[in-house]
């Protein structure tokens, strides 16, 4: 094995201590002091690998290994170091640390690439703090919406203020956008976050594409009243309406058995949240994903019709806003071919599979070709402290990534 598995494991174990909760959990919010602590140690490893580091004004950590011809479009790798509030040790982290190990191995073998290589930990991939993800990758590709910078977290802190506190100059963020054509391709190694590889007993998978996520926020408005005195038939209970919306989304997403459609309500905020008051207002998040965009559009229409019917039934009013809307994006065939060839060299039978979760690669796909490598995770558990990928599998994935980089550098 060309990469150093022991060093890689040591990096994972060191990173897992930053923002640690419980025995194996992680909480590193985007643009937070905890994430910055993670950036500091990751930057030290980047520099040991021969990279120059910086944090741009979107809050991305970027390490650059200068190539012989720095004018050539860059080969970019990476993922993210921010986590879910109750997350695991490997989601996102694998894509950053394994990429650093690849560059370190190149340096140890005195390989100076023709084109420069950049390793990026993108800011706020997860999207839980400000209810919208992929901020850093959207930032460098010029795909942010004007209101993204003003979104607020549950404590009322705006992203603008969080970035300022992080040390960014948001007034100059436009300067950190990459010019069209300046990124040659993007590679991302990631744990699968699903059970396919684990069930098939395959350590490595080749990603064929990423499902298109639709994120919406729905606010239902009824009428508060005394829980003991308002007759049931006279109520305008927003929480009852929300419950029916949740059931409707589940029924819509499961109408074709075995289809890759998924629907989730991940947050629910009830006002005034008293056991003795009929809920007046409920805000809930809707997450609908599918690799088939036409089907997702049909299901979205079905859900909107159900919301309209439910609100009329319970005499509620509602507003709905769109937070994220992306079409499915497919990996480049030529990069998949290189990954497959590297797997064959290592006697790995690596299946192709789709990614249901979105990744920073989804955003980069709009400006360059991309490829992804999946690493098996136990029982498919992710966004959970029980999330686990073995260091042996992660080392194998890094070895595949290293060979893939060498193959791409020949292009």
Image: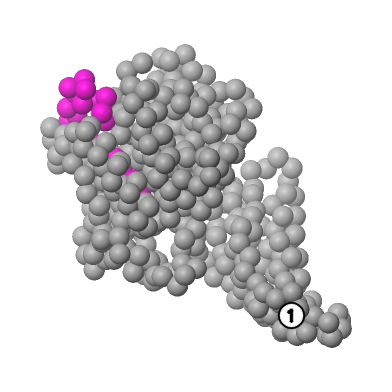
Q: Is residue 306 left or right of residue 118?
A: right
Q: Kindly indicate the quadrant of the structure image that contains residue 281.
A: bottom right
Q: Is residue 106 magenta?
A: yes
Q: Tell which residue pokes out farthest to the front in this image.
A: 22
Q: Which residues are magenta?
A: 103-122
Q: Kindly indicate the quadrant of the structure image that contains residue 134.
A: bottom left
x and y percent of residue 292 in the render?
A: 59, 47
In the depicted structure, whether residue 185 falls above or below residue 234: above
Q: Is residue 40 left or right of residue 401?
A: left
178 and 77: which is toward the camera? 77
The colouring scheme, among rainbow, by chain, secondary structure or one colour, is: one colour
In the depicted structure, whether residue 91 falls above or below residue 398: below
182 and 202: which is toward the camera? 202
For the point 73% across and 46% down, which residue is it? 256
x and y percent of residue 25 in the render?
A: 52, 44
x and y percent of residue 312 in the render?
A: 75, 78
Q: Is residue 188 magenta?
A: no
Q: Is residue 224 visible?
A: yes
For the point 43% across and 15% down, which residue is it? 346
For the point 17% across and 30% down, which residue is it? 114
Q: Kindly indicate the quadrant of the structure image that contains residue 92.
A: top left
Q: Is residue 284 left or right of residue 243?
A: left
* Residue that label 1 marks: 277
203 and 228: which is toward the camera? 228
Element class at badge 1: loop
For the point 72% across and 71% down, which residue is it? 239
In the depicted structure, whether residue 309 falls above or below residue 143: below
């Amino acid at each position: 094995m060309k990469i150093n598995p022991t060093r890689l494991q040591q990096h994972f174990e060191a990173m897992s201590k930053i923002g640690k909760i419980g025995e194996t959990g992680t909480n590193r919010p985007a643009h937070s002091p905890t994430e910055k602590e993670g950036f500091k140690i990751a930057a030290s490893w980047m520099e040991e690998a021969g990279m120059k580091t910086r944090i741009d004004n979107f809050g991305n950590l970027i390490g650059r290994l200068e190539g012989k011809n720095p004018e050539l479009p860059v080969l970019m790798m990476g993922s993210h170091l921010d986590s879910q509030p109750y997350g695991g040790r490997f989601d996102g982290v694998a894509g950053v640390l394994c990429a650093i190990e690849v560059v370190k191995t190149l340096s140890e073998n005195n390989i100076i690439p023709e084109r420069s290589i950049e390793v990026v930990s993108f800011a706020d991939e997860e999207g839980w703090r400000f209810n919208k993800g992929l901020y850093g990758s959207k930032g460098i590709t010029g795909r942010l919406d004007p209101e993204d910078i003003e979104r607020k977290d549950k404590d009322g802190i705006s992203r603008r203020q969080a970035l300022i506190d992080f040390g960014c100059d948001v007034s100059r963020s436009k300067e950190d956008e990459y010019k069209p054509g300046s990124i040659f391709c993007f590679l991302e190694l990631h744990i699968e976050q699903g059970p396919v590889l684990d069930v098939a007993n395959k350590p490595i998978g080749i990603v064929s594409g990423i499902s298109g996520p639709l994120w919406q926020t729905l606010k239902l408005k009824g009428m508060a009243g005394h829980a003991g005195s308002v007759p049931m038939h006279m109520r305008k209970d927003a929480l009852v309406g929300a419950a029916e919306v949740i059931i409707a989304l589940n029924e819509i997403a499961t109408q074709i058995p075995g289809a890759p459609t998924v629907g989730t309500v991940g947050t629910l905020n009830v006002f005034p949240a008293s056991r003795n008051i009929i809920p007046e207002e409920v805000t809930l998040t809707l997450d609908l994903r599918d690799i088939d965009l036409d089907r997702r559009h049909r299901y979205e229409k079905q859900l909107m019709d159900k919301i309209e019917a439910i609100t009329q039934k319970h005499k509620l009013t509602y507003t709905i806003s769109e937070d994220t809307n992306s079409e499915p994006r497919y990996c480049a065939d030529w990069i998949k071919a290189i990954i497959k060839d590297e797997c064959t060299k290592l006697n790995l039978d690596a299946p192709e599979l789709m990614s249901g979760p979105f990744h920073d690669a989804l955003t980069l796909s709009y400006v360059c070709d991309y490829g992804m490598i999946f690493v098996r995770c136990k029982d498919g558990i992710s966004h959970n402290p029980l999330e686990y990928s073995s260091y042996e599998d992660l080392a194998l994935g890094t070895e595949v990534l290293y060979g893939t980089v060498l193959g791409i550098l020949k292009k």
